Image (tube, rainbow, N blue to C red):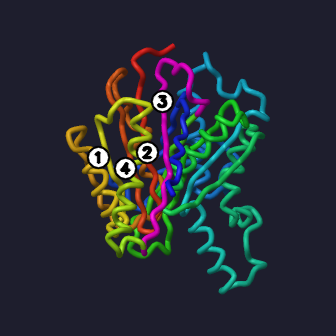
Amino acid sequence: MTVRVVVAESVVHGAGLVLPPEGTGPAESWFDHRARLGRGYKYLPPACQYLLAAARTALEDSGPQADPLAAAPELRGAVVGTNSAVAALHAAVDETVRREGAAALSPMSVPYFAVNLVAGRLSTEHLLKGFNLTVTSPRVAGVEALHLAALELAAGRAAVTLAGAAEAPDPRAADAAPEAGAALFVLRPGGGPVPSGGRALRTVLRFVPPPALAAAEGRRLARDSVRRALDALRAGGPAPDEVELLADPSPVGDAVADALRSWCADRAPVSTRWSGARAGALAPVVRLAARPLAAGTGSRLVVTASRAGNIALATAHTPEHTD
C-alpha cells in the first residue's frame, strides 16, 4: 500500500524573527520585554514573550496595504510548534513544590504549565478566534505548525494564520542543544497570486519507524518515502537552489541524508548539519524565514529529521511574477 503524500501550500505575507545575538549563551539575558513589548508582560514565560514580539514584527512586515488583521476575528488562526517553551517553568514548579509546597507557587506564572497557553496568549493579543493549535512533535514541530496552518487555510477555516515556532532553553535537556527565540509567519491560502515581497511555502510531513531501519527493506522503504515527498514538493515549484538538512545523528538522520543526497544529485548541493540532539524545533523555521531567494530563481529546501522518526520537508520561493 502506498501512503498518499499530502503537500500543504500557503503564501507568506510577513515574517518575524526574535533570536539571541550570535554567541549568546543559554543563561545570558538578551531580551528586554519592556523595550520590545511594553508594560504588562513581565510574568509571561520567555518563549511567550519572544513569540509576541515575533508576531508584531511579522504583522509589520506584512505592510499596511494588506493588513492581516482586517479579516474577521473568526477567520484568524494560530498554530505554534514548540518542544521546550515551558520546560524551565516545569522545572521551577517541581523544585518549588518539593522545597516549599504548592502554596508557594506564583499565581502569575503557574498557569503556563500548560504549553498551549503560550499560543493562547498570542490569540488573545490579536483576537485570533478561528482556531488555536499547539504542536510538540520532536524537532519538526515548527514546520508541522506551518503545515497544519496551510491545511486549515485550504479548508477555509481561516483567511489568515500566524504560524511558526517559539522556544526557550530546557534546563533538563542534558546534552541536547538548547534553543531560544521565535520565528513566526503571517500565512494566507496558497494557490493564488503572491504579493510583492511575499513567498510561496510548501510543506510535507513523513514518519519513519526507527526499528524498521534495522532491516534492508525498512531502509529502502524509508528512502522511497523521503523521495516521494521530495518529488511531490518539486512538482509544484522550481527546483531547489539551496538545500539544508537539520538532523540528529541517528539511523533516521542517516536514511534521510542518503535519500536527500541521491535525490539532489545534479540539482543542488546539500548542506548537512549534524547538530546532535536538540531541545527545540525552532531552527528549521528560522532557515525558512531567512533572507528570501531572488524572484524567479529556485527554491530553498529545508529538511528536518529527528531520531524519533519525525521528518518534515519545506520549500520557500519567491515567484518571478508577483502582484
Residue carrying label 1: 263
Label 4's element? helix
Q: CA distance from mark 1 to mark 3?
A: 22 Å
Residue displayed at 67% across by 40% down:
152
Taking the magenta stretch, the answer to whether it contains residue 132 is no
Side (left or right) of 8 relative to 268:
right
Side (left or right) of 304 relative to 258:
right
Foreground: 310 or 113?
Answer: 310
In this rendering, the count of numbered labels is: 4
Taking the magenta stretch, the answer to whether it contains residue 208 is yes
Q: CA distance from mark 2 to mark 3?
A: 16 Å
Q: Amino acid at mark 4?
A: Arg
Q: Amino acid at mark 3?
A: Ala
User: Image height check: is 129 above or below 200?
Assistant: below
Residue 200: assigned label: 3
Residue carrying label 4: 227
Q: Nearer the viewer, mark 4 or mark 3?
A: 4
Position in image of residue 163 (x %, y %):
59, 42
Q: Which numbered disc, 2 or 1, marks the residue that appears first in the sequence?
A: 1
Q: Which numbered disc, 2 or 3, marks the residue that appears first in the sequence?
A: 3
Position in image of residue 287 (x %, y %):
39, 44
Position in image of residue 143 (x %, y %):
50, 48
Side (left or right) of 51 relative to 69:
left
Label 2's element? helix
Residue carrying label 2: 286
Q: Are marks 4 and 1 in contact (CB under 8 Å)?
A: yes
Which residues are drawn in magenta? 187-211
